């Protein structure tokens, strides 16, 4: 084999390799492919994974994801039917159900997300503005099972809301409206949920102020009741203390009276044994209390005070 034949053979092998690489493509489990020829769609979409072939150079494999995709809406200010302005943040999961229709209408994921924005957001606003805030927040009008620190009077005055649809049903209606419109773009809206609902800043501040005022009112009532109970307790304590003091004083006086009576009996019995000695002792006590070294007395000779001074003692 001469050199020219070798060169031709190498060229043929290279051409076969290039054609093979240009015609072969791989479809992953998470992908689906639409084949186009000069911009026109050729055949049905390829959804089965594996090694596939196409015409080299003139046909192009356009890959699209087959798994679930994310959509995260921008939070927006929405008025409810009862004129309450809230911030609503939503998210959704979607997939490409018809890759050919998807390719013909939106072509890529960026454009698809813009379509989701244009369809889901208005549907969400339409449903939320059609119902009061409580419909979007709660599913049923059952009594709340959380512990609420409040007095009985305020608890009985709390407004009882009636929930007709509820958050889940509103969400289902948003999905139904959006899914019908997105199907025109080969998009299947699998699910949409409300991530967060919150008052706007001005309403939130007023709600917080009202909650603080209510808590302060309840706290002031508790403090007033506590002060009243404290006054009653102190009054009962003073009353009990006076009662104890009165009983103690009465008991002490009774004991003292009995002791004085007993002492008087003992003194009387002792002094009754010798009346003259008793008179002498009492006179000496009177001398001691009445007389001092500087005292001067002028007494009659027949005075009782003089009888012991005269030495007779009679």
Image (cartoon, rainbow, N blue to C red):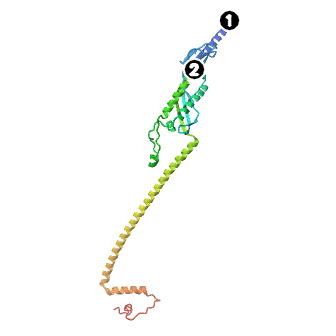
Q: How far across and how far down the image is residue 252, in percent?
A: 37, 71
Nearer mark to the viewer, of 2 and 1: 2
Corner quadrant of residue 273: bottom left
Q: Looking at the rendering, in which quadrant would you find the N terminus?
A: top right
- Look at mark 2 in the image and give the residue it sits on: 101
Identify the residue at horizontal 56%, vertical 45% (top origin).
206
Corner quadrant of residue 15: top right
Q: Which mark is residue 5?
A: 1
Q: Is residue 221 visible?
A: yes
Q: Looking at the rendering, in which quadrant would you find the C terminus?
A: bottom left
Q: Is residue 296 above or below residue 265?
A: below
Q: How far across and how far down the image is residue 246, in percent?
A: 38, 68
Identify the residue at horizontal 55%, vertical 33% (top origin).
125
Q: Is residue 250 above or below residue 84?
A: below
Q: Nearer the viewer, residue 107 or 53?
A: 107
Q: Residues within 10 Å of mark 1 (few under 14, many from 20)?
A: few
Q: Residue furthest top?
A: 1
Q: Nearer the viewer, residue 211 or 299?
A: 211
Identify the residue at horizontal 68%, vertical 6% (top origin).
5
Q: Which mark is residue 157?
A: none
Q: Is residue 95 visible?
A: no
Q: How far across and how far down the image is residue 11, in percent?
A: 67, 10
Kind of element beneath mark 2:
helix
Q: Is residue 128 above or below residue 250?
A: above
Q: Residues within 10 Å of mark 2 (few under 14, many from 20)?
A: some
Left or right, residue 87 beside residue 246:
right
Q: Is residue 167 above or below residue 26?
A: below
């Amino acid at each position: 084999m001469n050199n020219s034949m070798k060169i031709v053979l190498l060229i043929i092998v290279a051409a076969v390799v290039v054609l093979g690489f240009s015609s072969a493509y791989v479809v992953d489990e998470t992908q689906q492919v639409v084949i186009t020829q000069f911009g026109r769609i050729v055949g049905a979409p390829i959804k089965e994974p594996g090694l596939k072939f196409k015409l080299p150079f003139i046909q192009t494999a356009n890959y699209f994801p087959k798994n679930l995709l994310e959509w995260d809406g921008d939070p927006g200010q929405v008025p409810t039917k009862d004129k309450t302005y809230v911030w609503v943040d939503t998210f959704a999961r979607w997939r490409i159900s018809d890759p050919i229709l998807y390719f013909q209408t939106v072509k890529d994921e960026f454009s698809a997300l813009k379509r989701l924005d244009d369809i889901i957001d208005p549907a969400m606003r339409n449903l939320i503005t059609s119902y009061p805030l409580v419909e979007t927040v709660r599913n049923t009008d059952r009594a709340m099972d959380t512990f609420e620190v409040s007095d009985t009077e305020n608890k009985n005055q709390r407004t009882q809301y009636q929930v007709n649809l509820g958050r889940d049903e509103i969400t289902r209606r948003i999905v139904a409206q959006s899914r019908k419109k997105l199907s025109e773009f080969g998009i299947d809206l699998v699910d949409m949920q409300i991530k967060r609902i919150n008052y706007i800043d001005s309403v939130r501040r007023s709600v917080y102020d009202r909650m603080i005022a209510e808590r302060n009112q309840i706290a002031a009532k508790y403090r007033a009741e506590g002060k009243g109970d404290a006054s009653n307790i102190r009054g009962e304590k003073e009353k009990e203390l006076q009662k104890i003091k009165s009983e103690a004083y009465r008991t002490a006086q009774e004991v003292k009276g009995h002791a004085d009576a007993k002492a008087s009996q003992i003194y009387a019995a002792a002094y009754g044994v010798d009346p003259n000695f008793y008179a002498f002792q009492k006179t000496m006590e009177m001398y001691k209390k009445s007389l001092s070294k500087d005292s001067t007395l002028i007494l009659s000779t027949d005075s009782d005070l003089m009888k012991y001074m005269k030495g007779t003692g009679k």
